Image: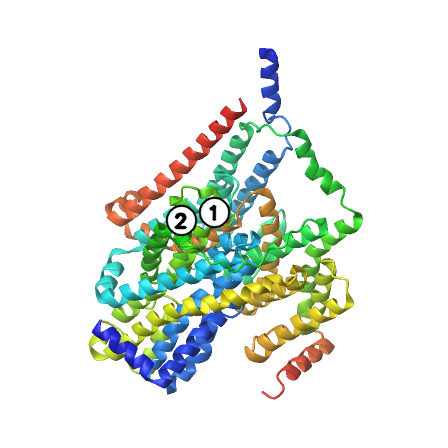
Amino acid sequence: MTRSDTKLETQDRTVSIFPLFSRPVLEWLFWLLLAAVVYSLTGGFDEPIAEYRFGAAGWPRALCAALAFGATGQLIYKLTKKRPLVDPQAEVEPEAASQSLSFRARLQRIGVFVAPFIYLYATPQIGFYVATPFLILAILLLLEVRKLKALAGVTFVVYGLVLLVFTRFFYVALPVGRIETFYDINNWIIALVRTGM
Amino acid sequence: MVEFIGGTLTLFGDPTAVMLFGLGLIGGMLFGAIPGVNMLTLGAVLLPFTINMEAPHAVMLFSVIYCSGVFGGAITAILFNIPGAPENAPTCFDGYPMTVKGQSGKAIGAAVSCSAIGGVASAVVMMAATPLIAGWAVRAFGPQEIFALIFFGLAVSASVGAETLWKGWLSVFAGLIIATIGTDPVGGVPRFNEGSVLGMEFSSYYLSAGIHFIPMILGFFAVSEVFTQAMSIAEGNRKRPKANLEFPSLAEFWAVRFTMLRSMFLGFFAGILPGIGATLAAFLGYSQAVRWSKTPERFGKGELAGVVASETANNSATGAAMIPLLALGLPGGALTAMIMGIFQIHGMEPGPLIFINSSDLVWITFAAMFWANLCIVFLGWLQTKTVVHILNVPFRWLAPGILLLATIGAYALRNLMVDVWVMFLAGAIGFFLRRTGYSAAGIVLGLILGKLGESAFAKSMQLMDYDFLGFFSRPIAAFLIIAAVLTIVSSIWNEIRGRELQKALID
């Protein structure tokens, strides 16, 4: 191998500055954008405080500057960093594994993220006591529990324990819903759980 | 010594006192372990009943709840990545990775032993030097020292759990920025509760109260863990952690002796300072363990010293927190404020005279805290032998329970659904942070230390007439600031040196 070949190989291993949409640049842009948005929002409360010279916006602005400095430091660090020698096959594998995921597996992955947010949206409307068994079932199904016995058993045990511990013993106030019918059902469940108390 | 023996005999010679001692011990441990309720919940429930109790019994009961409650949350932190209480959050950093590695018994064993050691040591110092230490610490630690201490903690925290130093710092800065949401600590000016982003206006009454760190902790640790495990199940590559009952060996304890001593010292001083308490003690203990370790890169990946540091420090703070309360009448946190309330209910006033006027109360409390910390070893050992078996239950069955516990924990905090939203959003963000090498621990540290730090900085500036060099006119503050700067410089140096080493290897 000639000296020029070695030089060429070293250059190949260095992360190029030119791709503007490489991950380090995107990360830098993200942090910079975040710092800029936060900085612009500080204008809304940039009020002088009688006994404090830096005012309400001083500290957050200093943090924005620190964030921008840190992000730039990280970008410079990454762009000037050389990649360690790795097996090219090994780099391809995770991507390939990700691409080989079936449509069902992809849906399952999305579902895991989406289900709790649907629950969060529904709970204030239909109440914790009605929404919760559906969340338990949804999570179990998303985690590939398929046996009817397990689905029913785990839902019953988890829901039962939550009711017993938090509603009967600790009197934790949980949302009972805004929609009238669900409001009544939730209160009926609470009354049932607290029977005899 | 004679007073301590007298206090012990009074405690165990009175059946009512023994019953209350047992109730406080088990109740504190139980309430500490369940997210959504904590020792403060138990304290608040029991407070009205103390009217009918004798004052020494009531104060003793609350002191025991304080000791066992601080320990209780370690179990769920280690087994499920759900800290039962904020002071157990740093225990998650290494406790849960140890569980994943099949070392749950070791992690719980270390937590049990170190909580007891930290608590007992703290109780002993409390008995020996309450009036002396309280006066000195409260005089010597002003806002400048508190800011310097927090700055030092932050300087170290950048290296916790992140892929690179830069990512660690960015995580800490992000946490510090989140901590500024709410009201400013000097003038009470609302910040970030309304504004406009890209032409879209927003206004939120909720944001005026700030983002509470408990939903963030639950999201970053518990919810993101469920997401991560669920992804592994979907991708078909999840490995099940093995339940393990092995306790740490004496050699392993010997190896972390300096970590334990350092955490004891830090926990004790954090406990004495009003408003600092066990949470900051745990974080400082952990960050200093990383700072002084020869293998800091192993922290966050299941290092025993991480669990030892956090659990020793938070329990060391319990005895110390009683010192300003009893000696000066200064409660340092919520539970010590409740104890102050008990004094007032019974027409008593804590302060230097309490050692003369109510020495029986003081010594029964000291003795109870000492024995409660020792009992943690036995109860903790029992827990280790029983609770660890939960890991044999398939994760698919546990996941809904973990999500629900976290949901109730976040909601019960302020009865706000927004806290639950914050928790799930933090969970989703935490999931991506893990994949991109940023540090959830860094964000949480920034969030917790940020509010205290800003407040101490503002007070310091006012006291020093905006002269930054004023920090160097106070020896403790100067020492801490210099230590923090040296920490930052040395970590940057290590990063550059590591990179040059890597470059040399490539070349």
Q: Residue at x 51, y 25 (%)?
A: B505
Q: Earlier in the sequence, mark 1 or mark 2?
A: 2
In the shown orientation, is residue B466 left or right of residue A176?
left
Q: Type of residue at label 1? A: Phe
Q: Position of residue A162 (x, y in %)?
A: 62, 73
According to the image, label 1 marks what residue?
B299
Mark 1 touches mark 2? (CB < 8 Å): yes
Q: Please say whether residue B1 is visible from this viewpoint.
A: yes
Between the residue at mark 1 and the residue at mark 2, the CA separation in whole angstroms equals 9 Å
Q: Position of residue B259 (x, y in %)?
A: 37, 51
Image quadrant for the N terminus of chain B? bottom left
Write down the chain letter for disc 2. Answer: B
Tally the numbered discs. 2
Q: Position of residue A130 (x, y in %)?
A: 70, 73
**Can you say whether A54 is above or below A154 in the image?**
above
| Relative height, residue A186 to residue B235 (above, below) | below
Amino acid on which the number 2 mark rests in the picture: Ala
Q: Is residue B21 left or right of residue A109?
A: left
Label 2, on which residue? B289
Task: Residue at 57%, 53% (x, y): give it.
Answer: B100
The disc placed on residue B479 is none
Asked if residue A135 lies left or right of residue B60, the reply is right
Identify the image quadrant of residue B69: bottom left
